[in-house]
Amino acid sequence: MIDDFKEYRERMNERILASDNKVIKRIFNIDTNCYMDGALSARVKEMLGLATSMVLRCDDCIKYHLEKCFELGVSKAEIFEVFAVADVVGGTIVIPHMRRGLEYWEELEKKKSSEL
Amino acid sequence: MIDDFKEYRERMNERILASDNKVIKRIFNIDTNCYMDGALSARVKEMLGLATSMVLRCDDCIKYHLEKCFELGVSKAEIFEVFAVADVVGGTIVIPHMRRGLEYWEELEKKKSSEL
Amino acid sequence: MIDDFKEYRERMNERILASDNKVIKRIFNIDTNCYMDGALSARVKEMLGLATSMVLRCDDCIKYHLEKCFELGVSKAEIFEVFAVADVVGGTIVIPHMRRGLEYWEELEKKKSSEL
Amino acid sequence: MIDDFKEYRERMNERILASDNKVIKRIFNIDTNCYMDGALSARVKEMLGLATSMVLRCDDCIKYHLEKCFELGVSKAEIFEVFAVADVVGGTIVIPHMRRGLEYWEELEKKKSSEL
Amino acid sequence: MIDDFKEYRERMNERILASDNKVIKRIFNIDTNCYMDGALSARVKEMLGLATSMVLRCDDCIKYHLEKCFELGVSKAEIFEVFAVADVVGGTIVIPHMRRGLEYWEELEKKKSSEL
Amino acid sequence: MIDDFKEYRERMNERILASDNKVIKRIFNIDTNCYMDGALSARVKEMLGLATSMVLRCDDCIKYHLEKCFELGVSKAEIFEVFAVADVVGGTIVIPHMRRGLEYWEELEKKKSSEL
């Protein structure tokens, strides 16, 4: 599930960038720079990316930010608090995305423990 | 299709509630209470839940409210009128969800007739 | 507040229809037909219109459906239950629209009692 | 992928129209008329349909308008400029839909070249 | 109405850019580049900007793109066809924005004729 | 501007709670509890509330979370980074809300310095 998602995203991103559309290239650049350490830590910014992706209900974006949060050591209790804010602000329509988000998070946990 | 959807929803809801996040638990509680008989009947409220889920384009939420409407005896002609209001208010982007919604409704009809 | 809103809406609708754009004219026609008595009563349909307008957060649409609900004798307790479903489904971002919606409803009540 | 999508859409549209709900029938009619040549060409209108479907993030609508754009001879460079506007206006949450949109466009290209 | 809107937008944009946040600066840059002549004309791109702003229901964005369309010689009949696509795709919740959009367009017409 | 906004919000919230609708009362309760210190600090949660309100484009919600962030000592540079994430995720339609958000933040700064 994790590997398929990554492979598809990377393959299609390459095809998009091959188009040589400058505006799109620059959006991809900004998207990377936006989440780097600055006045706020990358950790907090990835949680902001996760919460906004949840209320806008974009499963692929949720997965992406969950991965980044996982790499940056965000705890499961913290993830649930991000979920809680997103559910409160965005309503019960966010719940199906929380279900799929939790499933993905637990895949990340399993993958890591199988690699130890 | 119906059983898979229910099984997944229930399994993940259990995992979510196992997190012991109080805010999320209370949202799940409100979500249940919200659709009970009151000044408006549960029947009307489930139709409100269906229509709002359609314009916000949440397939899982649509399936959930279709199930509840089906259990409460909402007729197919009534469901189509809920679909019509949602299409008018939310535009043609609602149509793909109406297609999947109708497919699910007809699964519910088939399941019931096979159980008789 | 009520009269200004109606006057503006009617004046601009006239200007829109004066454009003689057939697609827009037909949308206006459907919008009227959609809320008529059918398998569901106009009353229930106006509540569906209200709830969907709330989760999509369109203040003008909310006012319009509140007027129609008021004319059709929907009670204040019923309106609050529509508000409740919209708040649950759409989250706390619906609350500012509920505040303005309640203000408008109470204007409708005042106007009616001043006319008696 | 293309044929499955078309077959499903057509089969369910037939079932929807079989319901004989007049409002829904008229929405389907308008949806067809809306994209015909007029003050603007069908070509420009299909690009408007594509861009709006992207920012509203409806994959089925995106596929539908990509097909129409393809039939009307819109070039790949033009499609990428539509993608670029949609990404700028709608943000990075549009990117996953651009990935799936490009995949579908390339399926349309493959299908056409295999038919020559 | 036109001058107030422009003055406010320019004044606040200056304050935003004074913050020296690189990500935001680059977004402003892309926003400008995105609508320049390329595979598609600036004229078509501004119409794409208008249509997407309408379905996302952002009045300030609608005004901005109406101004650009006006400067680039888009006709009133063409604007109404953009409105029509946006109404069909986005539903009746787009109508209040069409009313305000038309009002702004007619202000632009008046301003121009008073300057001749 | 700040006082008017607070006064209106409080007055209408009182009227809403006077309705004695249990579901709405409980939503108001959760809304308060959600932003308290927990696995994440109130400070981070208010930034999550701000970012989600921006991408969902709710000016009143933005103002509310800006106030809370201001009280909790979030710096202006941090606020701009929240704005940046929201702009990247949600697109240029978020910019008008950033303009009004910055205006409100600077009102909070002025009010505080006038009180010293």
Image: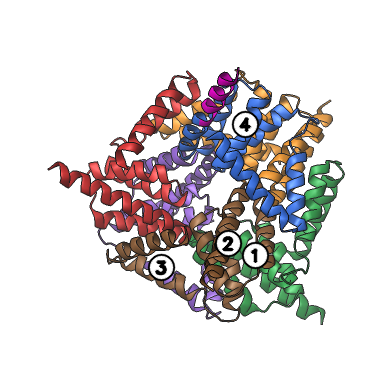
Chain colours: A blue, B red, C purple, D brown, E green, F orange
Which one is in front, A62 or D2?
D2
- Estimate the x, y position of residue C102 in percent, counting from the top left: 47, 44
Q: According to the image, label 4 marks what residue?
A: A67
Q: Residues within 10 Å of mark 1 (few under 14, many from 20)?
A: many
Q: CA distance from mark 3 to mark 4?
A: 42 Å
- The residue lying furthest to the left in this view is B116
Q: CA distance from mark 4 to mark 1?
A: 31 Å
Q: Amino acid at mark 1?
A: Ile
Q: CA distance from mark 3 to mark 1?
A: 27 Å
User: Does any portion of residue C8 appear in the rendered image?
Assistant: no
Could you tell which of marks 3 and 2 lies nearer the N-terminus? 3
Marks 4 and 1 share the same chain: no
Marks 3 and 1 share the same chain: yes
Q: According to the image, label 1 marks what residue?
A: D79
Q: Quadrant of the C terminus of chain C?
A: bottom left
Which one is in front, C112 or C59?
C59
Looking at the image, which residue is at 69% across and 58% down?
Answer: D84
Marks 2 and 4 share the same chain: no
Relative to residue B50, is residue E10 drawn left or right? right
- Estimate the x, y position of residue D14 in percent, counting from the top left: 32, 65
Q: Secondary structure at mark 1?
A: helix
Q: Amino acid at mark 2?
A: Trp
User: Does any portion of residue E42 appear in the rendered image?
Assistant: yes
Magenta range is A104-116
Which one is in front, E83 or B61?
B61
